Amino acid sequence: MPAEYRIAIERFTLPNGLRVVLSPDHSTPVVTVYVVYDVGARAEERGRTGFAHLFEHMMFQGSKNAPKGVHFRVVESNGGALNGSTHPDFTDYFEVLPSHKLAVGLWLEADRMRGLQLNRANLDNQRDAVKQERRLAIDNRPYARAIVERWPELAFRNWQSSHSIIGSFEDLDAATVADVRRFFRTYYAPNNAVLALAGGLDAAQARKLIEDYFGDIPPHPQPPRPDLSEPAPVEPRADVFQDPLAQVPALVMGYPGPPRRSPDFYALAMLDIVLTAGESSRFYQRLVKGRKSVIQYEANLGWPFAGPADYKDPGLYGIFLLHKPDYRGGQIARQVEEEIREITSQGVPARELNRARAFLRSGRVRQLQSSRSRAAALAQYEMLDGNPDYLNTELDVLLAVTGGQIQRAARQWLSPRRRTVLEIVPAKDPSRDRQGAVERSEP
Amino acid sequence: MNPTRPPRTPDFEPYKLPPVFETTLANGLEVVLVEDRRFPLVTARLGFQAGSKFDPPYLPGLSESTAALLTEGTKTRTARRIAEEMAAIGGGIKADSTPDALIIAASALAGPLPQMLDLLSDVACSAVFPPREVALRKQNRRQELLAQRSQADFLAAEKFVEVLFAPHPYCRQDPTLESIARLSRAGMTAFRDRHLAPNDAVLILLGSLPSRRETLELIRARFGDWKGRRVPLSPSARFSRPKRSITVVNRPGSVQADIRVGRLAVTRAHADYFPLLAANNVLGGGASSRLFRIIREKKGYAYDAHSAVAPLRDSGLASVITQVRNEVLPRALEGVLAEMRRLGQRGVSPRELAATKNYLNGVFVIRLETQDALASQLAGIRLMGLPLSYLEHYGPRVRAVQLDRLQAAAAKYFDPEASAIVVVGDAEKLVPPLEKFGAVKVEESR
């Protein structure tokens, strides 16, 4: 079953080290400018948790020729949308624009790659915005503190991977303008970045614009890379998190994943589709439908902060399950392991594997419809793998994975002694007991 | 090239809809075919006037659960078979309801279009609501609702529509624990029989389609025998007069206050709609909007501070949404109300208006990049009773908005004195500071 698409790719590197990927496609009059810097939360230092994210906010606070507020105004008044986000292993920024507004996005990205306008007042209000973001997304939300803070602590031994990506209030308060300046000098350099453009563009014209805007930005010394190495798992790990905001119990399970781009990496990605993708998957048919124990779930290589292909090693295969209160977390974990065991003992029938392949093919075509997701994947693959063409070639590798490979990968990577389990239980509260009683009285 | 100035770029072209063909089958089913050969995919929407506004008052969530059960078993297919057949063609099928409509969404790789249409017509016409699937839906929906109710933004949205729309059925868009317990196979079957008729439906099909004749043959063979019948009318569109009220939904232990401020506005067909859309964008539409600039970037009160216009078929909402830490609630709320007032009293500059028009027109095109997005837009427009040319007229209508009309729309629909305020958070901490804005009604989160 060959893939029906091919994404155009042109690559070059500017003399200052900026790697560029161009992908012209005129199916819609839209272009995405996507810049990724090779620094994420896992590069943070002790006492500065949340700094990569706070810094991402500072990238929108003004640069030499585009002072505070101008970035937003220029993008939006040219009909564009924008954002940035901090990941474990990189930080990205994008503008999606009507295609003939390409130069606007390049001008803005080049201006802030050259330098920021930093001051205490802007740092203080962004610190407040980030703290508010933390209250909104984590402190006031059920399951979030367990997933964002307790889970990495439990699943990783290396502090670089186990610390909070959003950061503590204490560490955020300690950040100074000098820290922001130092972070910029260390990591925000053309030689530590990838620029990808996808959509309605002319490659030759785009290249000329990029050389004009980015060509004279000086490179910095190559930044240090964090040591992310993780000791091999020797025994299962488990914990229980009392969540005062949750009303329905949940379970997180995870297994250290195979090396990125190794044969087992692809086999595990296929295994994940068989287990969890769509309503014909095993988890849905057997746990949600058959046993009626699980209500909803999500799972991925890279979960919860990354997708299957946008993290550096080592990564985890993570599973989150919301389950009925009449089951305990341990029972749900055993049910999940039974599903894994069935694969390790019996493999995957051909029909099921073919369904997984169809799911994969259509999912890939769907993903490629948007210029932003094309640009993001191309830039990330350039940065993480040194090869954006994986976007064209990896589908065939995935489609060629056999049932036997899946079986062997499940046996090796998802064995019970490698697992970490975090139960999230609604914290005791008298009003909750009442609801529990209603639940039990139902037929 | 001058690096100190934003580059000059040409103006952008108006949106061109891909080629559209419309027809009506003998049984009244409206069919819309859209040629979109960019990707080897096909996408369908089959929509009915059968949204939550048709739920009986004692049974909110009936439309939603009826929709969910359509794909859980038919006369000839079990739920599992539906899921497996769909997965085998790289597709998916899911039905859901909005306040106005019940919509079945399906998509697949382009080759197996006939199989996708088989499944679509089967779930639309022949669902049987198997008792064990109904029982499981009730169990799971109950737990999902409990999980939703642990989220402050869900509680805020739920209370906000209740305050603004009562007594119209738009005031109940989510089920309750009691109504979930009342769901039954008979009730869902009756809802389906009453509301899902071809003469009240639109089928939108887009993607890499075969020839028009062949596509219509495929559709007629599957939907042609479906019998038309009389369907119920929409509940009468009577709404209360907008007025200031303050409601606190108590959520003990909340570390922030979730605020909604707003009032009833207009449908997409109303003459005020485009001026309001522009006013909304200046007030809180993006990162260069006034709320973002002042409430977040200048004051640091919130991470999110935005406004929204939500048109429905028979009414609409204009609202401001933000979440602030407890200590700054009165200052932040004052700030929000002041920005609403200022927009109505002083209007906007010609430069702000021009920027807003560009933003609206640009993101409109950006949001149509995928087949799914285009299908959803087309279905939404059609189910609101508007012509598909609405998409092409969107740009010119945005361009035609005048300064005075924008200001008038702001003065009317973002009038703080006529707006209801809903705050979700720790009542003990929030009620005293809120009392200076008026009488506060406190409700426990259910």
Image (spheres, grey):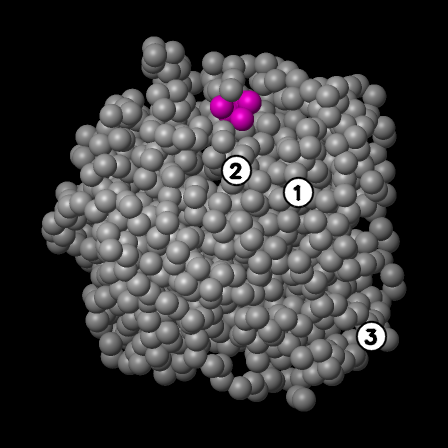
In this figure, which residue is indicated by the disc labeled 2? B85
What is the CA distance from the residue labelled 2 to the residue labelled 3?
A: 50 Å
Chain ID at mark 1: A
In this figure, which residue is indicated by the disc labeled 3? A14
Q: Do the residues labelled 1 and 3 touch (CB within 8 Å)?
A: no
Start-end of magenta stretch: A285-289
Identify the residue at horizontal 58%, vertical 24% (top origin).
Answer: A251
Q: Which amino acid does label 2 sit on?
A: Glu
Disc 1 is placed on an element classified as: helix
Chain ID at mark 2: B
Chain ID at mark 3: A
In this figure, which residue is indicated by the disc labeled 1? A357
Q: Which amino acid does label 3 sit on?
A: Leu
Q: In which quarter of the image is residue A382?
A: bottom right
Work out whether residue A178 or residue B290 is closer to the camera in this orientation and state it. B290
Q: Is residue A286 magenta?
A: yes
State which tag comes first along the sequence, 1 or 3: 3
Work out whether residue A13 or residue B423 is closer to the camera in this orientation and state it. A13
Identify the residue at horizontal 47%, vertical 14% (top origin).
Answer: A326
How far across and how far down the image is residue B219, in percent? Answer: 38, 53
Q: Nearer the viewer, mark 1 or mark 3?
A: 1
Work out whether residue A194 or residue B395 is closer to the camera in this orientation and state it. B395
How far across and how far down the image is residue A339, in percent? Answer: 65, 21
Identify the residue at horizontal 51%, vertical 25% (top origin).
Answer: A288
Q: Can residue A150 be seen in this view?
A: no
How far across and how far down the image is residue A358, in percent? Answer: 62, 44
